[in-house]
């Protein structure tokens, strides 16, 4: 591995640091977007049970605030309970707004991951240019230095490949997390609709 790093030259370090940054974000998002954390199974069931037994008035403002802070699901469910008296359109808008807040909370660092996916190929291109510059420097009045020429080619190719290797996984996980968040938001909004259907019966 160290031989590859040496052959790739100093520009490869930019890609190494970028890849470490991307891996850290991916691990953090996997941990933070666990279903058990984002949509606690007992939260919905407990709220549903209490609404069935005692109605929405059973929830005090302080308790709704605690539910809101509990998880992303809590943001949407607490909004549905708090605003159940609103007109249909106004209620729908309030739940959509709560969904946007939850989605924004869940999308933390994803913009950075997307940026890595965009910037990594450019860093690879930068390394390629550095390699090409070194390659042309191998040509002198006294002839060409085979060693310098080969090093320039090595730097160019390794950095080009490195940029792709970092960018592709970053973009794959970026798309995966965005899709995962959309699916979770849809599930949470469906849960809120079920609670409201119970309330309005």
Image (spheres, rainbow, N blue to C red):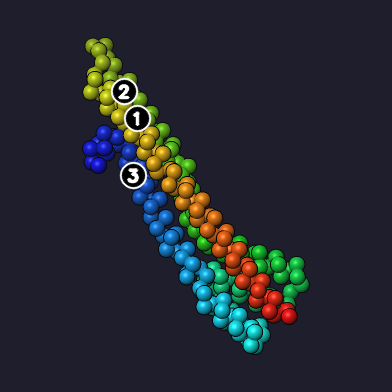
Would you name the residue on which mark 2 appears? Answer: 135
- How busy is the neighbourhood of tag 3: few (under 14 within 10 Å), some, or many (20 plus)? some
Whether 124 is drawn above or below 195: the answer is above
Q: Residues under labels 2 and 3: Cα distance?
A: 23 Å
- In three-dimensional space, the C-alpha distance between marks 1 and 3, rounded to whole angstroms, equals 16 Å
Q: Residue at x 53, y 55 (%)?
A: 178
Occupied quadrant, residue 138: top left
Residue 80 as seen in the image, left or right of residue 201: left
**Position above or below: 53 against 72:** below
Label 2's element? helix
Q: Is residue 26 visible?
A: yes
In contact (CB < 8 Å): disc 2 and disc 3 = no
Which quarter of the image is occupied by the C terminus? bottom right
Name the spot of residue 126 as percent of width and height, x first. 39, 33
* Disc on the earlier residue, 1 or 2: 2
The alpha-carbon separation of the residues under discs 1 and 2 comes to: 9 Å
The quadrant of the rendering that contains the N terminus is: top left
Residue holding disc 3 = 16
Kindly identify which numbered label has been placed on residue 156: 1
Q: Residues within 10 Å of mark 2 (few under 14, many from 20)?
A: many
Question: Considering only vertical position in the picture, is 114 above or below 198?
Answer: above
Q: Earlier in the sequence, mark 2 or mark 3?
A: 3
Q: Which mark is residue 12?
A: none
Residue at 37% from the left image edge and 47% from the top image edge: 19
Q: Which picture quadrant has residue 15? A: top left
Dot 1: within a 10 Å radius of its alpha carbon, few (fewer than 14), some, or many (20 or more) residues? Answer: many
- Residue at the spot 30% in from the left edge and 29% down from the top edge: 154
Q: Check contact, mark 1 vs mark 2: CB within 8 A.
A: yes
Q: Say which of 142 and 29 sits in front.
A: 29
* Residue 112 on image: x %, y %: 47, 51
- Which element carries disc 3, helix, strand or loop? helix
Name the residue at 52% across, 61% down: 106
């Amino acid at each position: 591995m160290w031989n590859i790093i040496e052959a790739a030259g100093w520009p490869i370090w930019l890609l190494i640091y970028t890849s470490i940054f991307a891996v850290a974000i991916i691990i953090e998002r996997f941990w933070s977007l666990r279903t058990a954390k984002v949509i606690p199974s007992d939260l919905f069931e407990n709220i549903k049970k209490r609404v069935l037994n005692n109605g929405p008035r059973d929830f005090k403002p302080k308790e709704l605030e605690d539910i809101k802070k509990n998880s992303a699901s809590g943001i949407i469910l607490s909004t549905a309970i708090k605003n159940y008296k609103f007109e249909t359109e106004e209620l729908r808008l309030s739940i959509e707004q709560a969904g946007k807040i939850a989605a924004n909370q869940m999308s933390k660092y994803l913009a950075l991951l997307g940026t890595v996916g965009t910037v990594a190929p450019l860093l690879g291109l930068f390394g390629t240019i550095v390699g090409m510059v070194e390659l042309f420097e191998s040509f002198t009045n006294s002839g060409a230095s085979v060693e310098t020429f080969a090093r320039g080619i090595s730097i160019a190719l390794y950095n080009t490949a490195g940029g792709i290797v970092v960018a592709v996984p970053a973009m794959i996980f970026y798309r995966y997390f965005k899709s995962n968040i959309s699916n979770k938001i849809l599930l949470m909004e469906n849960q809120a609709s079920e609670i409201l259907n119970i309330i309005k019966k």
